[in-house]
Image (cartoon, rainbow, N blue to C red):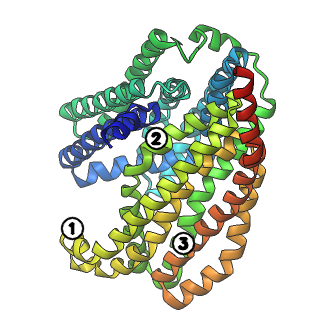
Amino acid sequence: MNHRLRRFFQRKFVQDTLALQVSKLGITGLSFVSSIIITRLMGDTAFGTWGLVQALFLLVQALNLTGIGTSTVSRLAVAVGARNESEILDLMAYYVRVLLLWSLVSIVGLALAGPPLARLMYEGDAHIGMLSALYSLTIPADGIYGLVVIALQSRRSMREVAVLQNANQVVLVVCALAALAISPTADAIVIGRLAYSYLTMALGLGVYWRLRVGERGTYPPFRDVLRRARTVPLGSYWRFGVANALDKNFALIYTQLPMTLVGAVWGKEAAGHLNLALTALGRLSFFTSAIYDNMQAVVPQAVGRGDFVGLRRNFLRALAALTVSGTGFFLALAIIAPLVVPPIYGDEWLPAIPLIQALCIYGAVTTAGGIFGPLYRAFEQMRAALAAKIAATVIMLPLGVALVMGSGALGGAWMINGMYGLSIAFTAVFTLRALYSKAGSRREVREGNQAEIEISD
């Protein structure tokens, strides 16, 4: 038993996942404590202004359909697995080129339209728009830092990622608190956020320079990436990125459409109960996020190496483990929800308890189904993935409307369950079919293994 445990914890995937999970514990703790301090220092008015600055900024960022984050995570890991240095350079250069173009569009757009738009939306307060335009200067710095993290993840340097992410969070807290110590205003927090973005960009580039050469692959010098960014063709990179962006946006549709229907038919209070249930389950995703982060690198690397037999074996093991653990965890949550909700949120939130219990199905389904994303992105099955999500939406929309009309917020919860359940079921069919096709039948695998033994003998 001890030998098996020792072997289990010696596996790189397990060690990387544990490193990421410990990192997320530190990040979550720092974020929680700093958010309380920042809220108390700023007060409700200044904190509300900061919230509106972020809302206007995020409204513009929602128009970003480049998908360079998720698409680069997948394709860069494939290129690293295949040791394709020219593809690695092109992917990183494409990321930088699109990032800088989008940064220019966002900065100029918010500088021109932000103040008049804020004046229209926020009772003549154009200053919010000016702060949003200033805040948009963080986009290129945050993007470059993000590329460094993606590069380290793609090479499965997860311990380095964990250290870098915790250092990033420390810089964020220090910059925010230093800015608010000078002036507890939204203006100060924006300046602090700018300082944080460019300091962590410099930190990320320093880490990249030290770690770009490694056993699992070598990355190009960043000056070569910048030079190649001027001429790298968009081509299929662009189409794949847009498909990833559209795919990611369906997650918002699956939660916000039922929420909107509940609010429109049953009012703000019912929508608030559903929102609390979704928020509570969303926070619990912390426990599995490290596994998904690791799978984002492991799956594409295996595809790049052509190790489909090993990928099938390990993927099915992970799927089975997440299915069992997710079902057990959310079943327990459904049982204890009536006991933990009142002391945490208060008796006024008792109507949210049956919603949390219903959405435990959504939690269990997405815990297991979340790992299909890295697989269909690595196989570049984006059309099939989008078709699965569209089909699930078309099927559940009339049923969901009927559920909401008849059962209120509880109907909205079951609409969410149905959309995610159908989407993941459809996705499992085409991804597993492709995985088995590429890995070969069990008989072919056994014959191949036997042939290797005979040759070695």
Q: Residues within 10 Å of mark 1 (few under 14, many from 20)?
A: few
Q: What amino acid is found at the position of numbered circle 1 in the picture?
A: Ile
Q: Position of residue 329 (x, y in %)?
A: 37, 63
Q: What amino acid is found at the position of numbered circle 3 in the picture?
A: Asn
- In the rendered image of this protein, does residue 371 appear above or below residue 353? above
* Mark toward the start of the polypeptide (1 vs 2): 2
Q: Position of residue 69 (x, y in %)?
A: 59, 36
Q: CA distance from mark 1 to mark 2?
A: 34 Å
* Mark toward the start of the polypeptide (3 vs 2): 2
User: Left or right: 34 with respect to 77?
Assistant: left
Residue 64, can we see it? no
Q: Position of residue 292 (x, y in %)?
A: 50, 44
- In the rendered image of this protein, does residue 214 appear above or below residue 304? above
Q: Which residue is mark 3?
A: 417
Report the disc number at residue 344: 1
Instruction: Please name whichever residue, 222 or 3, is drawn nearer the observer in this view of the structure.
Output: 3
User: Left or right: 140 with respect to 330?
Assistant: right
Q: What amino acid is found at the position of numbered circle 2 in the picture?
A: Ser
- In the rendered image of this protein, does residue 106 appear above or below residue 442? above
Residue 64 lies in quadrant: top right
Q: Are marks 3 and 2 in contact (CB under 8 Å)?
A: no
Q: Which residue is mark 2?
A: 132
